[in-house]
């Protein structure tokens, strides 16, 4: 259920016990692109894994919010900056490039939903198609 998911996010260090997003300090050693890629992969895994259990849109969007803002806090921490400054510098959906020019953009709720296959929003609930 939803409370177990929040507890697991807390145990993994993505949020506080109350569900507020936290930075992943151990990931600040990576490049910006690698941090964004790790968070994108984490969002996909969490949403795919817990989707059968959490069917309401508001609860899925809360999980995505926690992971999205955890990523932003991590990037801000890496650059010794604030969340506001990092968002004005990198944009609302932070982007980063590697030396080869390959770009990664942090997922938000809408872009993540497009990535999850076989999903359809029916009113307030998700259902498989």
Image (cartoon, rainbow, N blue to C red):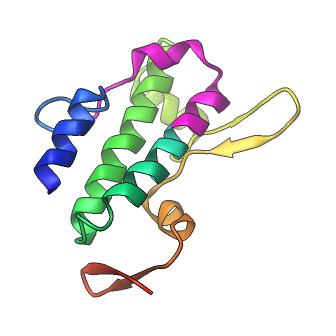
24 within the magenta span:
yes
Residue 119 higher or lower than 115, as above or below: below
Q: Which corner quadrant holds the C terminus?
A: bottom left
Establish if 66 lies above or below 25. below
Q: Position of residue 53 (x, y in %)?
A: 23, 64
Is residue 31 shown above or below 19?
above
Q: Residue at x 30, y 29 (%)?
A: 12
Q: Relative to 32, is 43 on the left or the right?
A: left
**Residue occupying image coordinates x 53% and y 45%:** 40
Residue 95, image x and y in percent?
A: 64, 40
Quadrant in the rendering for residue 96: top right
| Residue at 45% in and 14% down | 26
Q: Name the quadrant of the N terminus.
A: bottom left
Q: Residue 92: x, y in percent?
A: 51, 46
Asked if the magenta segment contains residue 109, the reply would be: no
Percent across and percent down for residue 11 are: 23, 28
Front residue of 15 and 91: 15
Quadrant of res 8:
top left
Tell me the magenta residue range.
21-38
Q: Is residue 57 left or right of residue 115?
A: left
In this picture, residue 74 sits left or right of residue 58: right
Q: What residue is shown at x 41% (from left), y 22% (from top)?
A: 82
Dominant secondary structure (helix, strand or loop) of the stretch shown in magenta: helix
Callout count? 0
């Amino acid at each position: 259920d939803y409370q177990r998911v929040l507890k697991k996010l807390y145990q993994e260090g993505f949020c506080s016990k109350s569900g507020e997003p936290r930075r992943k300090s151990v990931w600040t050693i990576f490049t910006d692109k690698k941090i964004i890629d790790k968070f994108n992969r984490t969002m996909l895994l969490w949403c795919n894994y817990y989707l059968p259990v959490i069917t309401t849109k508001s609860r899925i969007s809360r999980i995505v919010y926690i992971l999205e803002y955890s990523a932003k806090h991590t990037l801000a921490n890496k650059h010794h900056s604030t969340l506001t400054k990092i968002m004005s510098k990198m944009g609302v959906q932070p982007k980063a490039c590697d030396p080869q020019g390959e770009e990664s953009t942090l997922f938000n709720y809408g872009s993540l939903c497009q990535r999850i296959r076989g999903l359809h929003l029916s009113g307030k609930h998700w259902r498989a198609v």
